[in-house]
Amino acid sequence: MVAAASDGAVQGNLLLLGLPAADAERLAAHAHRVRLDRMATLMTPGSPINSVYFPESGALSEFVLMADGSAVEVGFIGREGMAGWPALFGSRVSGLWVVCQTGGVFLQFATTDLAAEVDRNPELHRRLHCHAAAVIGQRAISAACDRHHDVVARAARHLLAARDLGLDDELVVTHEFLALRLGVQRPTVTVALAELERLGAITHGRGHVTVADRACLERIACECYWTTRREIGRHLDWLPAPLGAWFSDANGVT
């Protein structure tokens, strides 16, 4: 983790976008803008949540670790969210393994500093409650998706989400990480990526995937890609119209 240049603003994350100037200025005084490398670990199960993180670029993954050492992803966080939010609702330790999946720039706050701002700032308090509700909704959708949809459709959904967060068709995605995201074995990921490539949606090589035809990938993805996008958007009611419309699009047209 290294410090990144800061312009003093806290506008790069959608949870903080458009806060009143005085509130944003107070937040900026507590923020540390840091650059995280891929695979950096931010939290482990049982560790105290001393800091929380708001992605401005890059993405974080949250995993549940099982007793046998295996893991499954339960959360994927980009600039629409934050890591460590349970600490603001009374949790003192993390229940999850939180890893930087895509390197980028993140706003880091000491948990105590942000909690004090939440207490004094009704709008920030409201937004973080909305975010908590969105996370719960997303996890419910993912649970249903894992039960009812095939691995090719789910892989397409996750690749689309990664592309949306990174705003780049070139994705740094290993088979191992995608297996954790989908809750399957690596050979199953190999088969799923090969099928997506056969259909013309992607090309892939060692450690990377390229979105070759987004429209094709959207047709293959299960309904949960759109449902999750809308779930996020309905809790971001402060966004300006163009951004809000993108999240709330009900017809699957981008």
Image: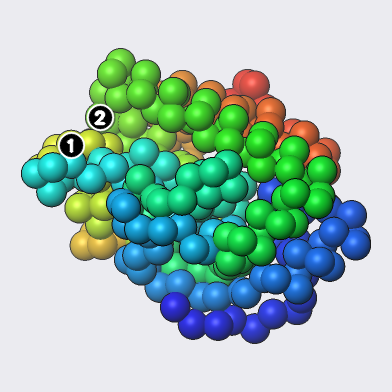
Screen quadrant of the N terminus: bottom left
Horizontal side of 115 relative to 11 (left or right) equals left
**Foreground pick, 218 / 40:** 40
Screen quadrant of the C terminus: top right
Question: In what element is the residue under mark 1?
Answer: loop
**Foreground pick, 219 / 199:** 219
Residue found 59% across the figure and 30% down from its top:
133
Q: Upstream in the sequence, badge 2 or badge 1?
A: 2
Q: Amino acid at mark 1?
A: Val
> Which labelled disc corresponds to residue 151?
2
Residue found 61% across the figure and 61% down from its top:
112
Residue 210 placement (x, y as % from top left): 38, 55
Residue tagged 1: 184
Residue 128 placement (x, y as % from top left): 66, 42
Q: Residues within 10 Å of mark 1 (few under 14, many from 20)?
A: some
Q: Is residue 107 above or below residue 231?
A: below
The CA distance from mark 2 to mark 1 is 8 Å
Horizontal side of 49 relative to 72 (left or right) equals right
In which quarter of the view is residue 243 placed?
A: top right
Residue 146 placement (x, y as % from top left): 30, 24
**Do residues under tags 2 and 1 come within 8 Å of each other at their CB atoms?**
yes
**Foreground pick, 59 / 217:** 59
In which quarter of the view is residue 180 placed?
A: top left
> Which labelled disc corresponds to residue 210?
none
Residue 11 placement (x, y as % from top left): 75, 61
Residue found 73% across the figure and 43% down from its top:
125
In which quarter of the view is residue 102 placed?
A: bottom left
